[in-house]
């Protein structure tokens, strides 16, 4: 039986970095599904396509080929053969990704690809609808979160390291806006699956979060 693990949670909860570490400790692959939506969002922005134009985004999605590879430094996300990994982590792309992910036909296409990848090998997937839609029968399901203020603080510190002078208050408002959009979209909104285990990282350091998730996985596998 495949070992499939799902981690859902809001923006800034640290899903991708935690998932990388958990997958590495377990010796399985990690698929960052959010990067796929970010790749679509970035492509739309580059081409001047209005992300609010649902049909235009659906047409764009259906015209693109999304692939991922796992390198020594983590997942690389490709759109039509171009590696977009280093370009998709901006606030603008994040909001575009949140917008395009609202569209049912876009989600159907992405979910099909994600399920196909997870069926091929043991894999950890993180995103916003992994436990509820993509992997409803996952071995272990985790909902990773933290307070909006803590998530904004982490994002603000990341931005500072990159030379940004964006004030904390603005980052906090962006986090809250993203939460509102993700949790209230009409198609597969972000929510904690009934059988997902909650991990609140507000007062935990990185290693404590990783250890907590590994303990949950171990219990689900052998408990």
Image: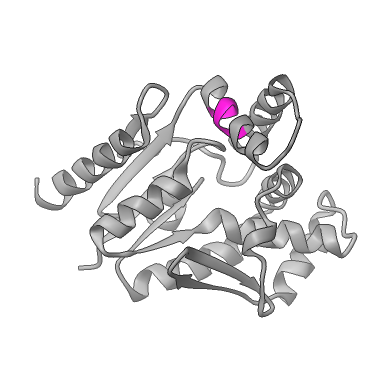
- The image shows residue 191 at horizontal and vertical percentages of 48, 36
Number of dots carrying numbers: 0
Q: Residue at x 63, y 39 (%)?
A: 161
The reply to whether residue 146 is in sight is: yes
Q: In the image, what residue occupies the spot 60% across and 61% down?
A: 36
Residue 136 makes an appearance in the image: no
Figure quadrant of residue 172: top right
Quarter of the rendering occupied by the C terminus: top left
Magenta highlight: main SS: helix
In the depicted structure, whether residue 158 falls above or below residue 107: above
Q: Is residue 136 left or right of residue 87?
A: left
The percent coordinates of residue 210 (x first, y second) are: 30, 42
Residue 127 location (% of width, % of height): 50, 49
Q: Is residue 196 left or right of residue 175?
A: left
Picture layout, residue 1 above or below residue 81: above
- Residue 152 highlighted magenta (yes or no): yes
Q: Nearer the viewer, residue 182 or 161?
A: 161
Q: Nearer the viewer, residue 170 or 31?
A: 170
How has the structure been colored for display? one colour
Residue 55 location in percent, x, y? Answer: 81, 60
Of 215 and 64, the residue lying toward us: 215
* Residue at 78% over, 68% down: 60
Which residue is most to the right?
Answer: 48
Q: Quadrant of residue 5?
A: bottom left
Which residues lie in the magenta part? 151-155
Q: Quadrant of the N terminus?
A: bottom left
Task: Say if the magenta span includes residue 219.
Answer: no
Q: Residue at x 45, y 71 (%)?
A: 70
């Amino acid at each position: 039986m495949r070992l499939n693990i799902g981690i859902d949670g809001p923006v800034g909860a640290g899903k991708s970095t935690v998932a990388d570490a958990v997958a590495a400790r377990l010796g399985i692959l990690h698929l960052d599904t959010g990067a796929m939506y970010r790749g679509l969002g970035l492509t739309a922005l580059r081409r001047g396509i209005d992300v609010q134009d649902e049909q235009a985004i659906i047409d764009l999605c259906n015209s693109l080929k999304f692939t991922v590879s796992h390198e020594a430094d983590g997942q690389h996300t490709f759109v039509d053969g171009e590696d977009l990994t280093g370009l998709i982590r901006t606030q603008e792309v994040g909001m575009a990704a949140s917008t395009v992910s609202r569209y049912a036909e876009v989600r159907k296409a992405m979910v099909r690809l994600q399920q196909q990848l997870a069926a091929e090998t043991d894999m950890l997937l993180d995103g916003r609808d992994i436990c509820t839609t993509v992997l409803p029968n996952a071995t272990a399901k985790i909902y990773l979160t933290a307070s909006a203020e803590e998530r904004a603080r982490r994002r603000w510190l990341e931005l500072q390291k990159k030379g940004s002078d964006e004030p904390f208050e603005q980052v906090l408002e962006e986090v809250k806006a993203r939460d509102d959009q993700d949790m209230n979209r009409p198609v597969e909104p972000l929510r904690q699956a009934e059988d997902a285990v909650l991990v609140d990282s507000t007062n935990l350091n990185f290693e404590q979060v990783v250890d907590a998730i590994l303990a949950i996985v171990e219990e689900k596998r052998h408990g």
